[in-house]
Every structure is written in structure tokens, then in C-alpha cells.
Amino acid sequence: MAEETSAVPTMDPMDRPAESAAPVGAVIHPPAISTLSLGQLMVSDVSAWLRIWKPKRSPDQPPTAGEIWHFWWNYCGLRATWIYRVSHAISRKRIPVLPGIFSRMNLVLHGFDMPASVPVGPGMYVPHPVGITVMANRIGENVTLVGAITIGMRHKPIFPTIGNNVFIGVGARVLGNIRIGDGASIGANAVVLTDVPPGATAVGIPAKIKLPQSTAAKSEESGLLENA
Ligand SMILES: CC(C)(COP(=O)(O)OP(=O)(O)OC[C@H]1O[C@@H](n2cnc3c(N)ncnc32)[C@H](O)[C@@H]1OP(=O)(O)O)[C@@H](O)C(=O)NCCC(=O)NCCS
């Protein structure tokens, strides 16, 4: 009996798709990454702007209508994020053609190449959408994509997985079957080809990993113990 195949890539424990799971070009309906409605996701994106620009404001306080208007009117990054949100929501409803129209519109208006199929958690902050090209398994919550960034394949069409609270600086390239851990930072113009542990910083070409101080101290301690 022929084995049943699925168009949705199966995930390994690192959330990486199995290499042969989906044929190239297959239509993959995006998996749910958040239970929030489209409106809630759009508001969460405004909250991300408020986190940066009004850090003293309580993060639990929802944005006012005036604040929403302010960020929408003044910043193309928020407008680009919202067009992506709409395209993704339509795509999840399996409505054909429209998601592609929204994505193309975003590319023409803002140079923001984020396909509708990429699942992104709430609170995405994109200050400068121009030149951002993203193809990723998923992008977590509260992620910052500064500008002119590429997230995509290296040799084969297998894509990175971006955790929560990740910062990706201007001009960075994040390539291949890699995972960027929660709270990691990717420096401006870095070319990241390996996993980045949670909380670590990756800088340079190819990127070198600088562990967070607490982890670095622990590894040093265990190294000392091993060598004792
Ligand atoms: C990666 C980044 C977030 C690190 O910030 P940080 O945690 O404060 O780290 P530091 O600035 O203390 O730098 C730590 C080390 O990495 C180096 N470094 C930092 N950013 C770097 C970069 N983009 N490329 C190469 N090396 C870098 C520093 O020289 C330092 O090296 P050292 O330990 O040998 O002295 C920050 O430097 C960065 O690149 N931000 C991008 C900002 C951006 O995109 N701005 C555009 C606005 S429009």
C-alpha cells in the first residue's frame, strides 16, 4: 500500500522540516502560530512600536486609537506589517489568489517580501521594511526585523526557524536549516549559518556566537571542573 504523504512538512524536535516532506512549489497552508484574531495581531504590532518608542508606558496597557493612528500614519513599517498580517489571515482561510495579491502589493509599496505562508507570532516590529526578504518555517513573538534582511535557504529549500524575542539587525542574512533561539540578537550585516543559542549574540561573516554572560560563565565553570 502506498504511504500517505502530507503537503505540510513534518517538524523535527528543533521545528525543522524534514528535507523531503514537501515537494518544492507545493502549496503549504500556513500552520497556526497564535490563537489571536487578525485584529488582535494588528494591535499587538502597534504594542511592539510602543514598547520601543514609549518604554515607560505599561506593556499591559492597550494602545489608544490615537496611538494606532499615529504609528499607522507615520511609519511604513507598520503598514507593511499589517498588509502581511492580512495576507496571512486570508491564506489561512484558504482563499486563493488574494494572499498573493496582498504580498505583491507589499513588495511594490514597501519592498517587503514576506510571503503570506510564513507564520509570525504577535508583536512584530519592522521599522524599515525596504529590502526585507523572508522565507522561514516560523517567526516567533516580539521579533524585530530592522531592515534589508534576508532570512531564507542556503543550498536547498530548507529554511530557518526564528524564536521569540529575537532581534535581527540591519543587513543581516540568516540562512539554511538553522534555529535562532529565544532572546538571541543578530548583529548588523552578520551572515548566520549555524544555530544561535537562546540569549546569544551572533556577529560577523560568517557569524561568530557570543554566549550570554551567565551561560558563558557556566560553560567556563564546567570546563574548569572537567579539567580539574
Ligand atoms: C549585535 C548588537 C545587537 C550587539 O549589541 P550589544 O549586545 O550591545 O553588544 P556590543 O555592542 O557590546 O558588542 C559585543 C561585541 O560584538 C561586536 N559587534 C557588535 N555588533 C557587531 C556587528 N554588527 N558586526 C560585528 N561585530 C559586532 C562588538 O565589537 C563587540 O566585540 P568585542 O566583544 O570583541 O568587543 C548590535 O551591535 C547591532 O549590530 N545592532 C544592530 C542595530 C541596527 O540594526 N541598527 C540599524 C538602525 S536603522
Image: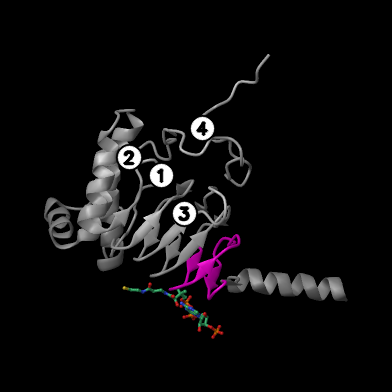
In this picture, is 124 found above or below 172? above
Q: Nearer the viewer, residue 114 or 60?
A: 114
Residue 165 visible in the snapshot: no
Q: Nearer the viewer, residue 184 or 93?
A: 93
Neighbor class of circle 2 (other Cα within 10 Å; few <14, some 14-19, many 20+) is many
For the residues labelled 1 and 2, say whether their Cβ atoms are less than 8 Å apart: yes
Indicate the secondary structure of the residue bearing disc 4.
loop
Indicate the secondary structure of the residue bearing disc 3.
loop
Task: Work out whether mark 3 precedes mark 1 in sequence or the reverse, and give the earlier one.
Answer: 1
The residue shown at (12%, 58%) is: 73
Residues in magenta, as a range: 184-206
For the residues labelled 3 and 1, say whether their Cβ atoms are less than 8 Å apart: no
Numbered tag placed on residue 8 in the rendering? 4
- Report the amino acid beneath label 4: Val
Residue tagged 2: 88
In this picture, is 23 found above or below 51? above
Q: Please state the horizontal and vertical placement of residue 61, each as a whole percent of the image.
A: 26, 53
Q: Marks 2 and 3: which is nearer the front?
A: 2
Neighbor class of circle 4 (other Cα within 10 Å; few <14, some 14-19, many 20+) is some
In this picture, is 149 found above or below 102? below
Neighbor class of circle 1 (other Cα within 10 Å; few <14, some 14-19, many 20+) is some
Task: Work out whether mark 4 precedes mark 3 in sequence or the reverse, and give the earlier one.
Answer: 4
